[in-house]
Amino acid sequence: MVQKSDTKQYWFNEKDLIKPIDWEYIKSLPEAIQDALELYMRGDISIGKASEIARIPYREIDSIRAKAKIPYHI
C-alpha cells in the first residue's frame, strides 16, 4: 500500500482544476488501482506504469483516470 500524503504534493494544484477530482470514486476502487493513481498524481510514474502496478490494461487505467477527473500528465 502506498502511503497517502496529507500534504497531497501532486504535480498539479487542485485549486487550478476546472473540474474537481472525484475522490469518492477513487476511494471506491481496489487498493492496487488507488495506489497506482496516487503514484501517478504525485508524478512518480507514468500512466503506463500505473497500469502495470494496478495489473489492468492501459486503456482501462486511463479510462479510470478520466472518470476520476485526474488531469493527464505528459
Image: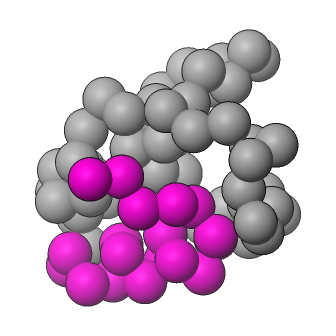
- Residue ID at (43%, 83%): 63
Q: Nearer the viewer, residue 56 or 59?
A: 59
Is 40 left, or right, of 57 in this rendering? right
Q: Answer whether residue 68 is magenta in the image.
A: yes
- Residue ID at (46%, 50%): 37
Vertical comparison of 59 with 54: above or below: below
Is 69 left, or right, of 34 in this rendering? right
Q: Position of residue 13 (x, y in %)?
A: 68, 36
Is 40 left, or right, of 24 in this rendering? left
Q: Nearer the viewer, residue 12 or 56?
A: 12
Q: Position of residue 4 (x, y in %)?
A: 63, 25
Q: Answer whether residue 63 is magenta in the image.
A: yes
Q: Position of residue 26 (x, y in %)?
A: 67, 61
Residue 5 sits in which quadrant? top right
Q: Position of residue 34 (x, y in %)?
A: 53, 51
* Residue 22 visible, this angle: no
Magenta highlight range: 57-74
- The colour scheme applied to this rendered structure is one colour
